[in-house]
Image (cartoon, grey):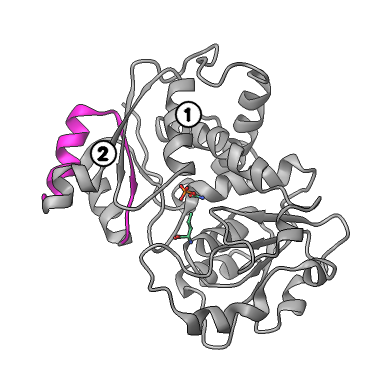
Amino acid sequence: MTYRHFLDLGDAGGNALAAMIHDAIERKEARRDWPKGQTDADAPLAGRVLAMVFEKNSTRTRVSFDIAIRQLGGTPLILDSGTSQLGRGETVADTARVLGRMADAIMVRTDDHAKVEEMARYAGVPVINGLTDRSHPCQIVADLLTIVEHGKSLPGLKLAWLGDCNNVMNSLVEAAGLLKFDMAIGTPQGYVPDPLYIDAARAAGSAITVTHDAAQAAQDADVVVTDTWISMGQEHAEQKLAELAPFQVDARLMAKAKPDAKFLHCLPAHVGEEVTEDVFEGPQSVVFDEAENRIHAQKSVLLWCFGMLAAATP
Ligand code: CP
Ligand code: NVA
């Protein structure tokens, strides 16, 4: 059986990422207005079981993968760390070997990125990163799909990231390098983006700038993106909130971007912190399209993992 792990966007590369977006658009259109639980006409993953392991909370990732595998004809199975032996200290390696015997693919949400890498080493079936402290590649497939659906072409696009340097940002930076768009990161002094992703994106030819001036980051952007200031597993720190306050996405900041700029947020949002209510609820916000697109994106990721996606040109 052909299988591939999806631990980071780079595992797929630019052509496959473009193919995922293309496939997601086609599958989404083909089932427009169908009941959500109805299987796609070709049921490409009929008979396959997707095991999902959660060591952190989730709404969108959990529901979208559950619905995605059903729409592809397969069956979901969920393990929460609190109710499985993983939560009592069974090793990742043993968990991977057991799940790999019982399921056809594994999606994992955890803290340490090394855990998904270990899962991939031992599973013998595709392993998908459903968020680690380091990256969130599945989210970014949905984000890119949303950007393209809203009429924007990725090569040459300027994406502004405002706020914390976190897992979602790392995967956006990786996507910039793979699909040739530019990124301006507006973040406080002392907040340093992970060089692993920045260096690779720059080496691929993308302009990735880091500024401590929020307005400069947002200037002429096609897309403005932010995320929570306190990610899962981080301490709630008043000092961090104060440092990030100048990077809140508000109407004044959106006015610096292009007039047709879109606002994205992976959710869950903390309205009043990283984004104001008028922007979050306003006409430029596409956050609920983005959330819905998690289903369509996850289907493409699953198909790619099983070697069922043809490559496309970015
Ligand atoms: N955006 C995202 O991954 O949401 P969940 O934490 O709800 O899965
Ligand atoms: N950066 C956030 C993303 C949640 C989907 C977190 O890690 O909590």
Q: Nearer the viewer, residue 258 or 313?
A: 258
Q: Does 82 sit above or below residue 115?
A: above
Give how far across and how far down residue 82 sits, in percent: 22, 48
Q: Give the residue drawn at x 45%, y 65%.
A: 231
Quarter residue 245 falls in = bottom right
Q: What whole-number distance in Å separates the C-alpha atoms at marks 2 and 1?
A: 17 Å
Quarter residue 222 falls in = bottom right
**Which residue is labeled 1 in the image?**
68
Graded by Cα atoms within 10 Å as few (under 14), some (14 to 19) or many (20 or more), the crowding at tag 2 reads some
Q: Give the residue drawn at x 59%, y 79%.
A: 244
Specify the label residue 294 is tagged with: none
Q: Residue furthest bottom?
A: 189
**Which residue is labeled 2 in the image?**
79
Give how far across and how far down residue 61 sits, in percent: 45, 43
Q: Nearer the viewer, residue 222 or 226?
A: 226
- Which of the image's four quarters has the N terminus? top left
Left-right relation of 47 to 295: left
- Which of the image's four quarters has the C terminus? top right
Q: Give the residue drawn at x 41%, y 53%.
A: 131
Q: Give the residue drawn at x 60%, y 30%.
A: 23
Residue 126 can be seen in this image: yes
Q: For mark 2, give the secondary structure.
A: strand
Q: Is residue 110 magenta?
A: yes
Give how far across and how far down residue 88 sits, in percent: 12, 51
Q: Amino acid at mark 2?
A: Leu
Give how far across and how far down residue 83 sits, in percent: 20, 42
Q: Is residue 209 magenta?
A: no
Closer to the eye: label 2 or 1: 2
Q: Amino acid at mark 1?
A: Ala
Graded by Cα atoms within 10 Å as few (under 14), some (14 to 19) or many (20 or more), the crowding at tag 1 reads many
Point out the stretch of residues depicted in magenta: 90-111
